[in-house]
Image (cartoon, rainbow, N blue to C red):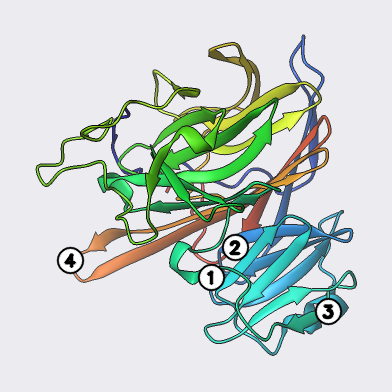
Amino acid sequence: MHRTTPLILISIVYIISACRAKMPAEEGTSFMIDNVTIPADTVVTSAVYMSGHIICLQADGKAFVLDTAFRRDNKLTDNFAAYRFDLLKPFRDTVFLATSRQVFVLGNDLSLHLLSKPPFDDSLGFPYFGDSRYRVYACSVGEFGAAVRFLDAKTGQLYAYPATNPQQVFFFHGEYVVSSYLAHMEGFSDYLFIKDPGKLYPTRKQTACNWFIDTAMHIKIPPAGQANPAGVRYYEDSFISRTLACFPLGDSLYSIYSTDSATVLARFSGQHLVATDTLLHQGLTFYDTHPQLLPDGALTAGYATWGIIKQPDYLQPYQVAGMVWVRGHRITFVSFKVPHTPDDGD
């Protein structure tokens, strides 16, 4: 089914530029690339676009607001100052923020509105996608397995299929697309295309996330007594790649991913992923991303933290954080200048 490959221990500097730069895409493509660097208190773990603004959530639970020119909006940021959030997620046209005890939705003016009860089934986590037929969830136990789960809104039946570590799920050209990235060792990305979730493996909410792996860590697909479901396509790269976002634009489906030496834009063509442009001549470092699809692109944030022993009794901390915003044929890479960002040569 899929392989597990090595955890990336960050060897690449994530600072992109200290000023806003513009580069034309290579010949044969029509994407433009912007690079922006802005300050932050600590790493940004997630970002969501709403009402002409970008809401960012930091690892310390603080939220702040940027406009579309990436300038901090202090007035709107004050809306969130009284809280420390554990979660910032979009679902359909709604943005949710949650503390350890409360769940809020954002109004169009970015005001907080407290919900009287959780909006989703806690046993399945926060949904990755939803339409009139299915609400889609995912779970992961890292290198020990993961799954994507489809809850049928009509019947209440849950269907599941193994996945590497889902980042995002969306519907494109008659198929559900599941883009995965596992930051184990050097990092590994793959993609699932699912035509009919009702033909996947029926399961229950209590079923383990990696039900398809036995106690000896052998993958058993299909499970005993079951046929492999029809209408499932699987694609993986033959090289190390770290997917930042997968998104449709027009009639094409694109992926932005990093290798050790470059960040690349690629387009799906039949059963293949074809590189169309080198966006950055360096790789980017991150643990996980959960892109928000927008009508004309996507928004995602990624970060990583690590330490290097400099002396027997001293661990030097490092951290990097960034964001990628696709708007039509313009891609903006935002680097957050945070404490302990490595300098060139570190």
Q: Give the foreground label among 4 and 3.
A: 3
Local SS, label 1: loop
CB within 8 Å, label 3 to label 1: no
Q: Give the foreground label among 3 and 2.
A: 3
The residue closer to the viewer here, 111 or 127, is: 127
- Checking the image for residue 111, the label placed there is 3
Q: Is residue 11 visible?
A: no
Q: CA distance from mark 3 to mark 1?
A: 21 Å
Local SS, label 4: loop
Earlier-in-chain disc, 1 versus 4: 1
Q: Is residue 23 above or below residue 149?
A: above
CB within 8 Å, label 2 to label 1: yes
Q: CA distance from mark 4 to mark 3?
A: 49 Å
The residue closer to the viewer here, 204 or 216, is: 204
Type of amino acid under label 2? Val
- Checking the image for residue 59, the label placed there is 1
Q: CA distance from mark 1 to mark 4?
A: 28 Å
Q: Is residue 50 above or below residue 273?
A: below
Type of amino acid under label 1? Ala
Q: Is residue 172 above or below residue 73?
A: above
Local SS, label 3: loop
- The residue identified by callout 2 is 44
- Local packing at callout 1 (Cα closer than 10 Å; few below 14, some 14-19, many 20+) is some
Q: What is the x, y in percent for residue 48? A: 72, 58
Q: What is the x, y in percent for residue 183? A: 39, 44
- The residue identified by callout 4 is 312
Q: What is the x, y in percent for residue 250? A: 81, 25
Q: What is the x, y in percent for residue 168? A: 57, 44
Type of amino acid under label 3? Ser
Type of amino acid under label 4? Pro
